[in-house]
Amino acid sequence: MDCCHITNTKTVNYLPDDAIVVDTYDNFRFEFYYFYEDKFYHYNGINFDKLNINENFKGDKFCVLWDVESNPIPVKFNKFKVEKDLI
């Protein structure tokens, strides 16, 4: 069985227990964000929305997460993984 029940390409009904809670990054605080299998998700109260992956001119991949103060924060995959000891 698939780990996540996907209703479309952008929304997941649930994430497994080993999904990482994203509550901090580079001194910013977040709520309702998760990281699982190299993807960021936002819990909207019903489902988990998969965030778009962006790439800057250097080739760094990132997603934009909104911090607890409602500021858009670009979260770089490699930096996040280093902070969380994933690489």
Image (cartoon, rainbow, N blue to C red):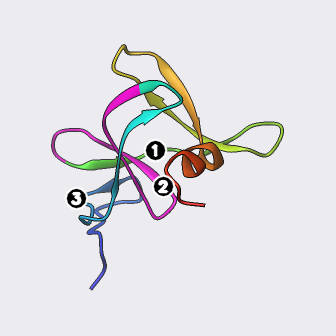
Please, is residue 2 above or below residue 59 in the view? below
Residue type marked 2:
Lys
Of labels 1 and 2, the one closer to you: 2
Q: Which residue is mark 2?
A: 39
- Residue at 35%, 60% in the rendered image: 8
In the displayed orientation, state which residue is furthest to the left. Answer: 46
Q: Position of residue 61 (x, y in %)?
A: 67, 46
The label number, if any, that marks residue 51 in the structure image: 1
- Residue at 22%, 49% in the rendered image: 47
Taking the image as shown, residue 83 lies to the left or right of residue 34, namely right
Q: Helix, strand or loop at disc 3?
A: loop
Taking the image as shown, residue 61 lies to the left or right of residue 47, namely right
Q: Which residue is mark 3?
A: 13
Measured in 3D between alpha carbons, the distance from the residue under mark 1 to the one under mark 2, in whole angstroms, is: 7 Å
Please, is residue 25 above or below residue 5 in the view? above
Taking the image as shown, residue 35 lies to the left or right of residue 63, namely left
- Residue at 33%, 59% in the rendered image: 19
Mark 3 crowd level (few <14, some 14–19, many ≥20, 10 Å Cα): some
Of labels 2 and 3, the one closer to you: 2
Q: Helix, strand or loop at disc 2?
A: strand
